[in-house]
Image (cartoon, helix red, strand yellow):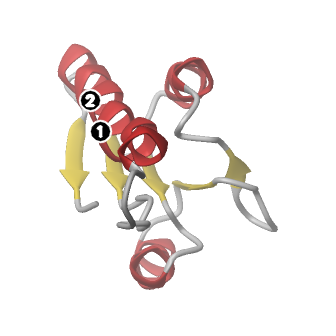
């Protein structure tokens, strides 16, 4: 099973990624900026996210990524990552019969 996990540089994402990586060989780690062992993908960019899903073709997506700015007037800034990206991921999973674990 190919597992794609987003938000691997965050607090929860680091822990989940470490556990998954030790138990499964086929884990694809996604982070906004990319780093050693991760693939860069800006979840706020819908076309980039859709291309990534198509290219990687995961059997399971664990979405842990989220924008955590809850200040006044930030809805427009957090919408792409916190609302649109999960909708795109859910549509991909429905279309391909992939599993989805949504935690953000």
The residue depicted at 33 percent of the width and 54 percent of the height is 62
In this view, the residue in front, 27 or 49, is 49
Left or right of 11 in this view: 98 = left
Callout 2: SS: helix
Residue drawn at x 47%, y 27% as measured from the top left = 57
Does 7 sit left or right of 101 as displayed?
right
Q: Residue drawn 22% across and 44% down?
A: 100
Q: Which residue is mark 2?
A: 87
Residue sitting at x 75%, y 56% = 33
Q: Position of residue 63 (x, y in %)?
A: 35, 53
For discs 1 and 2, the disc positioned in front in the rendered view:
1
Eyeballing the image, is 97 above or below 60?
above
Near-viewer residue (61 or 50): 50
Mark linked to residue 47? none
Q: Give me the C-alpha separation between circle 1 and circle 2.
A: 6 Å
**Left or right: where 45 falls relative to 59:** right
Q: Residues within 10 Å of mark 2 (few under 14, many from 20)?
A: few
Residue assigned mark 1: 83
Disc 1 packing (10 Å; few <14; some 14–19; many ≥20): few
Question: Looking at the rendering, in which quadrant would you find the C terminus?
Answer: bottom left
| Camera-nearest residue between 28 and 22 | 28
How far across and how far down the image is residue 99, in percent?
Answer: 21, 41
Is residue 18 depicted above or below 32 in this figure? below
Q: Is residue 63 shown above or below 83?
A: below
Q: Spot the residue most to the front.
A: 72
């Amino acid at each position: 099973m190919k597992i794609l996990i987003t938000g691997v540089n965050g607090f929860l994402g680091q822990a989940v990624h470490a556990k998954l990586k030790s138990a499964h060989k086929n884990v694809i780690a996604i982070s906004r900026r990319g780093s050693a062992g991760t693939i860069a993908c800006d979840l706020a960019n819908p076309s980039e996210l859709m291309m990534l899903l198509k290219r990687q073709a995961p059997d399971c997506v664990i979405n842990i990524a989220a924008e955590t700015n809850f200040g006044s007037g930030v809805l427009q800034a957090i919408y792409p990552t916190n609302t649109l990206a999960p909708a795109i991921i859910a549509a991909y999973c429905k279309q391909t019969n992939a599993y989805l674990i949504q935690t953000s």
